Each structure stands twice: as C-alpha cells, then as structure tokens.
Image (cartoon, rainbow, N blue to C red):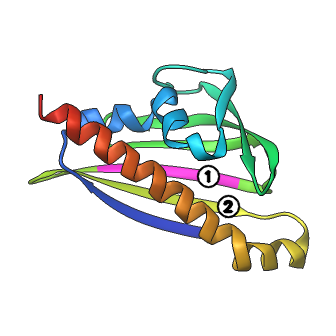
C-alpha cells in the first residue's frame, strides 16, 4: 500500500524562479543541512534536468542512507517528477507541481511511497516515517520560499 503526502506552499516569487530553485541540487543540500544530505553521484550541483540522476547520501534515523532518483518527466515551468531508482523504499515517486497565482506561485508536493518489510514497514511508516518526511519537506519548502522571495525582491 502506498502512502501519500500532499503539501501546498505559497511563494511570492515568479513561477520559473520557483521551478528552477526546486530542481537546484545546491539549494536542496543547503535546505537539508540538518541531515548532512549531499549529492554524491550523477548531477551533484546546479539544476537537474530531464533523465538525469542524483544519488543522495544523508543521515536519517541515526545512520547514513543513500537514495538515487531520476527526473522522469518535466513540463517547464509547471511540473516535474523524480522517481527512486535505488534506495530503501519499495517505491518512491515525488511529483512537483507549480501553479502561477496572483501573488506568485503555488508549489505542490505529491509524494507517494511504499515501505518494505511488510507489516513492520507499515507500522514504522504510521508511527514515525510519514511525520519525518512531512517535516523534511516542510523544512525544504520553507528554505525555497525564503530563497526565492528574497531573490524576487531585487
């Protein structure tokens, strides 16, 4: 069974700026400073593009974990999808949707994933993992909001 997380973030910046910031590897690493997340293979800096991959290494739940994803779809500047190629999930798909608003951009995250380990994975997801991933995404989104809104003022 897949778990689904849906988050909406309003950002007072142009849609193209928000779209590019959301694909920027360096900004992601800055937003994930707490987990020491680093891009270690594939596209390791700058803006990731269609069919490119990135391998992340970060400290989650007290241990260093790797997660490799690939950008499988892009529709500039309104949509892109990254999917896990290798990692600790059975499935992991993150849709990034961007809508132009009267005050800037609405950024929508749709994260769908499936945990391994049968019932134990489901229990871990309900008790810990889903809240952890929501917090991780909210931290990232607040960082992107601050970054793009500050740049949009100049």
- Residue 51's disc is none
CB under 8 Å between callouts 1 and 2? yes
Q: Which residue is mark 2?
A: 113
Q: Main secondary structure of the magenta part?
A: strand
Q: Disc 1 on helix, strand or loop?
A: strand
Residue 85 image point, x, y percent: 74, 39
Residue 52 makes an appearance in the image: yes
Magenta stretch encompasses residue 55: no
94 and 7: which is toward the camera: 7
The residue under the point 39% across, 45% down is 143
- Circle 2 packing at 10 Å, graded few (<14), some (14-19), many (20+), is many
Residue 141 image point, x, y percent: 41, 51
Residue 2 makes an appearance in the image: no
100 and 31: which is toward the camera: 31
Q: Is residue 98 above or below residue 76?
A: below
- Circle 1 packing at 10 Å, graded few (<14), some (14-19), many (20+), is some
The residue under the point 56% across, 56% down is 136
Residue 135 image point, x, y percent: 54, 63
Magenta stretch encompasses residue 93: yes
Q: Is residue 25 left or right of residue 92?
A: left
Q: Disc 2 on helix, strand or loop?
A: strand
- Residue 93's disc is 1
The residue under the point 58% across, 69% down is 4
| Chain part drawn in magenta | 92-98
Tell me the quarter of the image containing the N terminus: bottom right
The total of numbered circles placed on residues is: 2
């Amino acid at each position: 069974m897949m778990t689904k997380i849906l988050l909406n973030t309003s950002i007072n910046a142009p849609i193209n700026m928000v779209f590019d910031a959301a694909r920027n590897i360096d900004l992601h690493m800055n937003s994930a400073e707490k987990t020491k997340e680093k891009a270690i293979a594939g596209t390791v800096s700058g803006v990731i593009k269609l069919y490119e991959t990135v391998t992340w290494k970060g400290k989650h739940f007290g241990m260093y974990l790797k997660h490799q994803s690939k950008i499988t779809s892009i529709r500039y500047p309104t949509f892109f999808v990254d999917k896990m190629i290798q990692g600790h999930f059975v499935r992991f798909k993150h849709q990034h949707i961007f809508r132009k608003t009267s005050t800037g951009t609405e950024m929508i995250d749709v994260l769908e994933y499936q945990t391994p380990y049968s019932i134990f994975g489901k229990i871990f997801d309900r008790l810990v993992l889903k809240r952890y991933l929501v917090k991780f995404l909210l931290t990232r989104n607040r960082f992107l909001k601050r970054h793009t809104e500050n740049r949009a003022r100049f």
